[in-house]
Image (tube, rainbow, N blue to C red):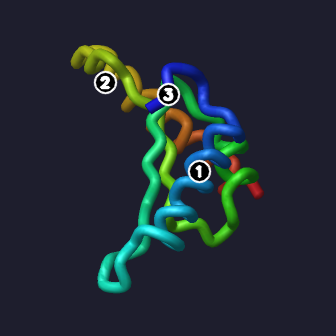
Amino acid sequence: MKTHKLTHQDLGQLQLYVNYYDRYEKQPEENPTIGILLCTDKNDTAVRLTLPEDNKTILASKYQLYLPTSDQLIEQNNQVRRLASNIEEKKEKK
């Protein structure tokens, strides 16, 4: 867990730990190790560019200290719907 915005250094460090554990600690009968990185904010571009394209072992996500209110959830939902609607309209115009 990081108390700052996600950086490519954070992802690289976690990848190092996952690789080390898989190579030296993991038992043959165990599944591949995964790394989960929680941070106050994430940069999706940094996640995509820092990790291998076929990555299935590192997950990065933003965490919140407090749950959003019902009104905030409704507003977020409405924003996503508006964005999806705009994308569909642009596709139809092409």
For residue 70, side relative to residue 36 (left or right): left
Residue occupied by mark 2:
73
Q: How far is the residue under mark 3 from the one under mark 1?
A: 36 Å
Q: Residue furthest front?
A: 24
Badge 2 vs badge 1, beta-carbon distance below 8 Å: no
- Regarding mark 1 in the picture, which secondary structure is present there? helix
Q: Callout 3: helix, strand or loop?
A: loop
The tag earlier along the polypeptide, 3 or 1, is 3
Question: Quick one: label 2 or label 1, which is nearer the N terminus?
Answer: 2
Residue corresponding to mark 1: 88
**Element at label 2:** helix
Q: Nearer the viewer, residue 10 or 60?
A: 10
Q: Amino acid at mark 1?
A: Glu
Q: Nearer the viewer, residue 55 or 80?
A: 55
Q: Residue lying furthest left in this view?
A: 70
Q: Residue at x 42, y 66 (%)?
A: 33
Judged left or right of residue 20, residue 51 is right
Crowd band around label 3 with a 10 angstrom C-alpha radius: few (<14), some (14–19), many (20+): some
Looking at the rendered image, the quarter that the C terminus falls into is: bottom right
